[in-house]
Structure formats: C-alpha cells, structure tokens
Image: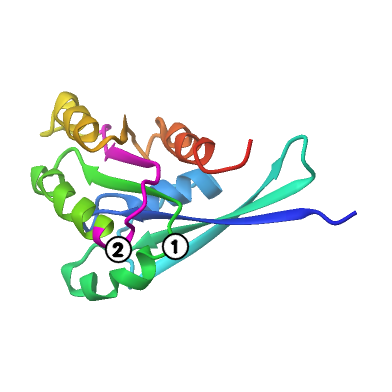
Amino acid sequence: MTETHYVYKVVIIGDFAVGKTSLIKEYMEKTFQYDYKPTIGANIAKKDFEIPKSKAVASVNFWDIAGQKMFATLHRPFFEGANGVLIVYDVTRPDSFNNLGNWFNDFKKIVKSDIPGVIVGNKIDLKREVKTKQGKKYADSIGFYFIETSAKENKNVEDAFRYILSNILPK
C-alpha cells in the first residue's frame, strides 16, 4: 500500500536580526545560537509529520528568508507557493514592528490566496519597546494569529509553529 505524501512550504519573514533563524533552530533542533550570523538569501529546513489515521506523511519546508533590504529583489521565488507565513518582529526594536506592513504587503503581492499567518513578537526575554497590545492589534487588523516568543528561552516557540501547522496539515 502506497503512502500519500504531502509537501508544504512555510515562509518565515521579517527584518534582519529579529530572530527568524533562532526560532527555526529552537523549533527544529532545540538549540539557541548566541552569535548572530545573517541569512544570505534563504535557508530551508525540512520536517516530516505523520498524519494520523491516513497513512500519509507531510513534509514541511520552512523557508527562513533574509531580512536585509538588499535581498528584497529575491523575495518573489522564495514567497511563491507558500502555504503559511510567520512574520517576525523584535519587541525591542520598534522599527522592525513598523516594517510589518511592508513585509505583509510584499508577501500579499506575490501570494494572493488567503493562507494562515502568524505575527510573532520575538525576544520577550529582553527589555521590550513594543507593547503586546500593539502586536495583537496589528495581527487582528490583517486576520493573522498573534503570539510573543523568546527563542532564547524557548517560550511559545512550539506554539507559534503548532498554530501554523494545525492550519495547513491535513487532519
């Protein structure tokens, strides 16, 4: 009997140094890397999930997209075909929060269908400058789920990914 195999793409976007790579590493490997190494272009991590009751497997490719402006022209092929998106900002950097709209608009220009999304306020272990209610209000305004995380302390990281996966994987 052949097994059904699904393939999904989740993109993780946001400004540089907001913790996108750290969130993925914490989710996938349960590790935190203290030294900052910027992503060049995109990094892809893959995780397989068995779908209960259906003899199916779902492979999810998590695309960690570089946040530097110089890579903006590369976004189209990275965004195309996405089934879910996490847009990350750093709660200690209001500029990264203020850029959420740019990231969302750029993403929606390429991915026109309604797909599940999460606004992630990261680095809650540090001194915050963006209030929780600001992040929640923005997420509500675009119809996305909202969560705050700390990749360093592994707070709510699993929950952020669980939300997106529960909305894209077959039941």
- 125 versus 37 height, above or below: above
Give SS at disc 1. loop
Instruction: Report x, y in % for residue 147.
Output: 32, 31
Residue named by callout 1: 81
Give SS at disc 2. helix
Quick one: which residue is furthest to the right in this view? 1
Q: How far separated are the C-alphas under marks 2 and 1?
A: 9 Å
Instruction: Report x, y in % for residue 133.
Output: 16, 24
Q: Is residue 163 left or right of residue 132?
A: right
- 151 versus 140 height, above or below: below
Residue in the image at 22% along x and 59% along y: 16
Instruction: Report x, y in % for residue 13.
Output: 30, 55
Q: How many other residues sit within 10 Å of disc 1, few (<14), some (14-19) or many (≥20)?
A: some
Residue in the image at 30% along x and 36% along y: 144
Q: Is residue 166 left or right of residue 142?
A: right
Q: To which quarter of the image does residue 151 belong? A: top left
For marks 2 and 1 on the same chain, the one whose residue lies earlier in the sequence: 1
Quick one: which residue is furthest to the top in this view? 133
Q: The C terminus appears in which quarter of the rendering?
A: top right
User: Magenta segment, which residues?
Assistant: 109-125
